Amino acid sequence: MQKSMIKLLSIADAISITNAIFGFLAILFLFSCIGTCGNFQTRASFTFIFLALLADGFDGIVARKTRKSDLGEYLESMADMTSLVIAPASFIYYIYSSMEVFNVFRYIYLLFALILFLSFGIIRLASFHIMKEDKFFIGLPASVSTIILVIVAWLEVDFIFLLPAVIIIGAAMASDIIFIKPGIKINAVTAILIVLSLILYNNFYKIAPLLLLAAILIYVVGSPIYSKIMKKENK
């Protein structure tokens, strides 16, 4: 007898769906003028993207501790597409297309970079479960790219530097570069920094998001170097 689709779901799948909902809300609030337009929209979208990041990490923990479903890997990729690719791309578009100093050439450049980022994100997430490894990631994790780009856009880094970063990070997601999977302690520290970024946000000289960004950049630069050293030692 054929199972119903709802019965195929596990607890971890419900968290993945929550991840997608957070991503959808992050996009929705960008284009909803509630309260003070601009600041409210940015804060709401930032919050929901970071909540989606927490849900993305939590669903993996729950999946390892509870029953895994046949839909799990597909659901996770679909949820991540919404929250870790489309939502951050929308966040960047909203912030930089709203700037006063903007012209048609910058607009085309912005669209071109975000379309490339979207394309690389689709490739990565579609192939993730096929190329999945136990001890490392092939290509830059979507969660890492999201943290970097959202914080950089939120800091309103100059347009000249942002767009190359969007393209490079997008390409790194679909690359063959090896990134070590962080352990429980590193993931716990990252989660704490994400929570602090949500709570403190723009307070105390933006220290929490800046610390999170610094930690992530150390991982991005250090992880491929560390993996190469480990390969040489194992030969």
Image (cartoon, grey):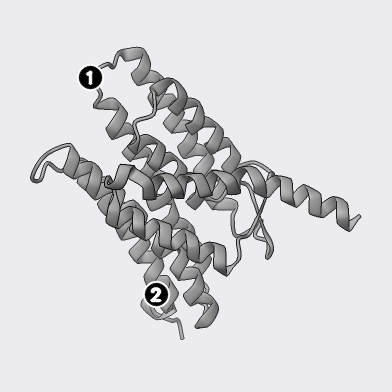
Residue drawn at (24%, 42%), measured in percent from left and top? 42
Find residue 177 and report its image quarter: top right
Residue on which the image places disc 1:
100
Left or right for 182, reference 109: right
Give the residue furthest to the right: 235
Q: Which residue is mark 2?
A: 5
Quadrant position of the C terminus in the picture? bottom right
Kindly identify the residue that appears in the image at 53 percent across and 37 percent down. 170
Q: Would you call the spot at circle 1 few (<14 residues within 10 Å), some (14-19), or many (20 or more)?
A: few
- Relative to 38, is 20 above or below? below
SS at circle 1: loop
Residue 92: which numbered mark, if any?
Answer: none
| 7 is higher (above) or lower (below) than 177 | below
Q: Secondary structure at mark 2?
A: loop
Dots 1 and 2: beta carbons under 8 Å?
no
Q: Position of residue 17 (x, y in %)?
A: 36, 65
Q: Position of residue 81 (x, y in %)?
A: 43, 51
**Residue 5 or 212: which is nearer the viewer?**
212
